Image: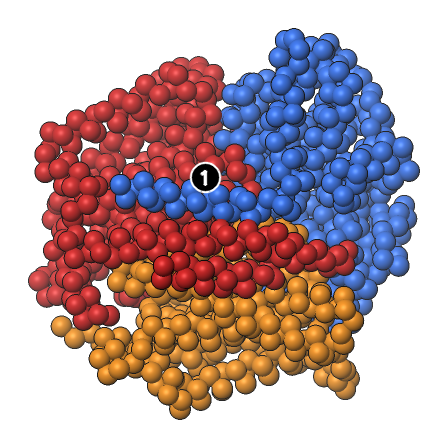
Chain colours: A orange, B blue, C red
Amino acid sequence: MDYFLELFFGGLTRGSIYALIALGYTMVYGIVQLINFAHGEIYMIGAFTALIVASVLTFYGVNTVAILILASIVAVIYSSAYGFTVEKIAYKPLRNAPRLSPLISAIGMSIFLQNYVLLAQTSDFLPFPRLIPQFHFMEPVSHIFSSAELVIVVTTMVAMVLLTLFIKFTNLGKAMRATAQDKTMALLIGIDVDRVISATFIIGSSLAALGGVLIASHIGQINFYIGFIAGIKAFTAAVLGGIGSIPGAVLGALILGWTESFATGYVSSDYEDVFAFALLVLILIFRPAGLLGKAETKKV
Amino acid sequence: MKKLLLFAVMAAMFVFAGCSQKPKEEAKAEGETPAATEQPAAAEGGVIKIGVAGAHSGDLASYGIPSLKAAELVVKQVNEKGGLLGKKVELVPADDVCKPEVAVSSANKLVSEGVVAVLGHICSGATKAAMGTYLAAKIPVMSPSATSPDLTKSGEYPNFFRTIAPDDAQARLEIDFATDVLKVSKVAIIHDKGDYGKGLAEYAKQFAEADGKLQVVLFEGITPGAVDYSAIVQKIKQSGAEAVIYGGYHPEASKIITLIVKKKVPVKFISDDGVKDDTFIKVAGTFAEGVYATGPKDTSTNPLTIEATKLHKETYGEDPGAFYLNAYTAMLAITNAIEKAGSTDYDAVTNALRTEYVETPIGKIKFDEKGDAIGAGFSVYQVQNGVYVEIQ
Amino acid sequence: MNEIIKSLKVAVWFMFLTFPIMVIKVNTVYHIIEWRWMNMAMIGIGTFLISLLWRYLLERKDKKKPSDGVTLSARAQAYVQSRPLVKKGLGLAVLAALTVIPSFADAYQVNILTVALMYVVLGLGLNIVVGLAGLLDLGYVAFYAVGAYTYALLNHSFGLSFWIVLPLGGFFACIFGILLGFPVLRLRGDYLAIVTLGFGEIIRLVLENWSEFSHGPSGIAGIDRPNFFGLDLTLNQMNGAIYYMMIAFTIVTIFFVARLQNSRIGRAWLALREDDIACQAMGVGRTRTKLMAFALGATWAGLMGVVFAAKTSFINPASFTFLESAIILSIVVLGGMGSIPGVILGALIMILLPEYMRAFSQYRMLIFGGAMVVMMVFRPQGLVSNFRRKYSFHGMDERLGG
């Protein structure tokens, strides 16, 4: 039973990490129908910015909690700025282009950003300070669940709830939904579509940055390549849950996390990713629009 | 017209990228354009070209760049002393990003540039792919880091040499150490699914099963770069293993050891020279305490090692990276063999490599018939108080 | 003046944006912090100039839009397209140039060109799937791997020769294409993309993990090179022979794809790409047509896989990563989807550009990524736009201002 619980919580943590990144994917896709391959890189840049800020602050002897908060804030600001800029440079000019062109542009951007960080910083793995304070739970719990894991899970849940409320009730959120449904109509009723798209990129990027900071301080090291794998997994999660749907992204991410965790635990970690992708294929065969995605009926 | 403009943008971007990087890259950039630009060739009779192949860019660059630097430093010394056979030595770098298909292009490039010997490649896979090209062109190749046993044991590549011991020697040592010194009876063998890590893990498993003293309770590969390894750590715990033998590189090793300590899994951790890297200790911090790793014998007291390290620090302002000493050794061995052979002829040079001893940072070595260095070996290290200490 | 102020703003923005990563270099291993203020100035000046240029070019691009097709390149393209004789002459000239290259270029150049030609064929193969049938395939490299491993394993275990395995490799890849195609063709657009991506990863992971079958990550070495009429060739001659074989291969492929495009099935693909419901209503079987595209595309990848294994004489799973799929896809999109000369041009750029940029070693991939973005922004329809595209209803969105 213990073993099962351990795997369960391991999967939950992993799923929550995917979820934070997947939310950005799903929001962007919902609005501009673009697979934003550079999203993983935004996450990586968030982690790097946090590392840089944390190092500088440590140098000047600021205390840990203040560092965690400041580093997160700066990382979020910078990641949003990068997300915003990437959209303006690589996607906005392509809004009316053939559907695949922005995809290629996104892949190019992803390669560019990876190498930018590689050149400006280093190709080595850098240790990331463990910013999340350690506190110990009582014994039966403590070897199953650590404080860092708890922080990650809680952050994801809070982020999802806030985001859902935001999309449901604020003006900007409503504008986002309108834009997602029909860009032209949204424009006609006076929604500034460009602004909405920028806002989407900014929100998605901040979540990714938050994910970056949390995961980096949980795992304890980063390099310029971490965004790529995490990005692919998060994208898989978003599709699994039904791309465009916010609860879907979180659900998909958690399922993916659990699948990987249990596959490793009960079968073999050799085929952990095979299980993840096989599950994706299976689910899509039976629900072609993902778990919570709405199947579009196309009218002729 | 449009294309012209497009070109202009690209040119501008390049200029921009170029100059914005320059200041901090200065040291590197100087190194990048090696001997070639500095000397307008020797007075008489041209130059001797030696290729340096390996990952000079991409995610494995940190394993390839130190070799390039080592080669440059050795060549600089050789040229200051008047060169080889009265000619200046020139390095021809070729980047293979550690990919087999790129390595073949790199090899072709080096062959067509007319190199007489090659230092490289860095990764075993890339080396295997490139060897055919060098063999056909009769060029001796010496790798500082390709540890795949096949390269020498298969006997297919008589032109291959290396200054690092092959993986099976390391696996042997790990198993012996686990049985005889640590006296454990159950091990979990974990690897990173890579050429190096999985190869090593498979040898370890094979030796353990052949000996019969050590029970392998878990044999699994992990996905490098995954966001979390808690599931595999739980599985190790569940398996009841007393020790973990990990085949792979330090980034994953440090993640796993951190989780093992955090989750209070009572296992000893034994790994390989991909982990016997100071970065591992720096990254894993206190979690690294007590970890065992096999690595090339400690040669830090060897005067040549001290000199090589000092030279690197003076030139580049930092400590040398991975395989630096092996590459330094290889370059010394190559230049020495050419000197002793008195020509750059393939047969003469390979013969000299096999017969002439040379003083290097890793000891006094020559090469056996298959190309492995005689005199290069492994020992076991343990992390104690934040440094690797040789214990066997 | 306005433009200059805007560019200044952009420069300031970028100086802010790149501040932490470009200016501060941290090394947490040695606890060193390095401040590189010079970089900031460089970024400022650099972005200012680029921004000016960028604005100017974008403006030009926007202005031109209403009267599409009057640019020099478009006119040249139309000219060539409308005169079959010129087209043939151009083709022959390129062919002649390619044929004589090995007589003066060295082995390295020939090798690069061979690789580029392989990617031309791969690009044309993927073009059937993506460009003609409009199915986004992000796991194309899986079929390439199937071909490569078919030859490597059959050669390794049974000593079968290149010429026997070549059709077999295509055949196996084709079977895989159909096997994958069946369950997933119901999926639309990007769902299909992620499933194919997953499929590509599954194939690679299986090759990596199933050591008994595929020799695992250490790969298979010593694969026989092709045998040309029983001649005993040196390595250089062998490279030359493979090069000429690839030229022949490319010509056959071009011929085949060109004929395919204008055939019944080719037109069915185009119709399906534009609107699959209308297409079904017209009586085109959707599943069959899509499967056909998948299978044919896969066959080409399989054939190239065999050639790849024979050429490098060593393969391991690391050669078949997602990045490879992305590069082949980029070739198709960059060159212009559905256009044969476009794909050829795209392949030459994508493969030769990084190869000849080796001089810039470290900046190579940075420039490569940047160039991909720039090219897409300024020529979203690809380098050579497909003529058929003219009839699609593009103007609609624009007029509505979307």
- Determine the residue positioned at 65% across, 75% down: A70
> Looking at this view, is C315 or C272 the one in front?
C272
Residue C104 percent location from the top left of the image: 39, 16
> Looking at this view, is C303 or A63 the one in front?
A63
How many numbered marks have been drawn onto this rendered protein structure? 1
> Looking at this view, is B214 or A218 the one in front?
A218
Give the side of residue B255 with respect to residue B376, left or right. left
Give the side of residue C290 with respect to residue C172, left or right. left
For disc 1, the marked residue is C354
Secondary structure beneath disc 1?
helix
Badge 1 crowding class, 10 Å Cα cut-off, few under 14, some 14 to 19, many 20 or more, is some
Quarter holding residue B160: top right
Is residue A55 visible to the viewer in this orientation of the structure?
yes
Which quadrant: the C terminus of chain C? bottom left
> Looking at this view, is C223 or A201 the one in front?
A201
Residue C364 percent location from the top left of the image: 50, 42
Quarter holding residue C3: bottom left
Which quadrant: the N terminus of chain C? bottom left
Give the side of residue B50 with respect to residue C131, left or right. right
Of all chains, the one bearing label 1 is C
Q: Amino acid at mark 1?
A: Pro
- Determine the residue positioned at 43% across, 45% down: B12
Residue C195 percent location from the top left of the image: 38, 62
Placement of C37 over or under A33, stated as above or below: above
- Determine the residue positioned at 55% across, 48% down: B20
